[in-house]
Image (cartoon, grey):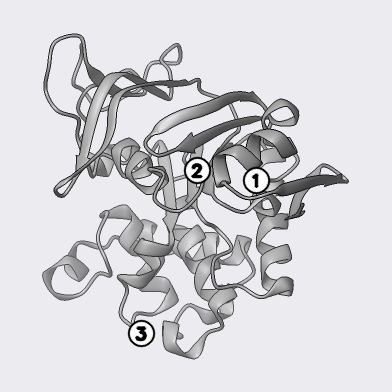
Amino acid sequence: METGNTKSPEAKLVEIRNATIWRGTTRVFENLNLVIAQHERVAVLGPNGCGKTTLMKTINRELYPVVKADSFVRILGRDTWNVWKLREHIGVVSHDLHQRYTPDTTALEVVISGFFSSIGVQGSLARHVSGSQRNAAIETLGELGVESLQDTPLRAMSTGQQRRCLLARALVHRPDTLILDEPTAGLDFAASFDYLGRLRRLAEAGRNIVIVTHHLNEIPPEVDRVVLLQNGRIAADGPKKAVLNSDLLSKVYEARIRVAEIDGYYLAYPG
């Protein structure tokens, strides 16, 4: 398998075969198999502790599987990537990434750091920022309606504004694919609806979307496939309408759950 830094248009976005993956001292997955094609819009759903974050970190190349025969994790057809180059193809937004930024980091610094796969651009890294990178960062902030905050520190923003800065960081490379881990965590109703609306528009514009969540209402109507995890295994994988049903979710979450669909969104409520 090639190990360069360009993608093949025929390659799968994610191809995992017989993968055993540990997070620290915990074995989260054993013999995991999963394929996600390019141009798919997928939600990865499941209870806390089921392996969602571990799967996301594996796709992001923060975690690697145990080396063994007939086992691999390939992203866009490659076993290995320079993470800077991978971010040109896959943008990532997560609550964990959000928490790693200091409150004094400005919006512009957040977005520019996307070019370096870093947290901020302090110290010697700042000297490597080009004028074109700075302009691209400002333009991306403008596309998300927060250009006026470019010199504002995160501590002076609402959580919704902060999350838009993180989204701009993921988009600054103009990647084909966005991976979002619990995208509306910590947001109120208004900010959640605004953020989900922006994700819908990105999907409508042709972006591939992978959403990792345990909230059905975070899954936009444009997502048509759901991978349901339970205790480190795939409990179900298929069309959204087939997976998001009361009986299956009740079994996986070990609680009686009822499901309603409203305008393409799914909502869960007590059974």
Q: Where 188 falls versus 75 (above or below)?
A: below
Q: Residue at x 18, y 21 (%)?
A: 3
What's the mark number on residue 202?
1
The residue positioned farthest toward the right in the image shown: 263
Q: Is residue 210 visible?
A: no
Residue type highlighted by circle 3: Pro
**SS category of the residue bearing label 3:** loop
Dot label at residue 178:
2
Classify 10 Å Cα crowding around label 2: few (below 14), some (14-19), many (20 and above): many
> As drawn, is 107 to the left or to the right of 120?
right
- Of callouts 3 and 2, which one flags the residue occurring earlier in the amino acid sequence? 3
Residue 205: percent from the left, percent from the top? 68, 39
| SS class, disc 1 | helix
The mark found on residue 103 in the picture is: 3
Residue mark closest to the camera, 1 vs 3:
3
Write the residue at 23% across / 34% down.
21
**Rendering coords of residue 80 (x, y %):** 19, 27
Q: Nearer the viewer, residue 89 or 37?
A: 37
Q: Earlier in the sequence, mark 1 or mark 3?
A: 3
- Specify whether residue 247 is in view: yes
Q: Disc 2 or 1, which lies upstream in sequence?
A: 2
The answer to whether residue 88 is left or right of residue 69 is right
Q: Please say if the residues under marks 2 and 1 sit with CB atoms less than 8 Å apart.
A: yes
- Neighbours of disc 3 within 10 Å: few (<14), some (14-19), many (20+): few
Three-letter amino acid code at the position of disc 2: Leu
Q: Are marks 3 and 2 in contact (CB under 8 Å)?
A: no
How packed mark 1 is, by other alpha carbons closer than 10 Å (few <14, some 14-19, many 20 or more), is some
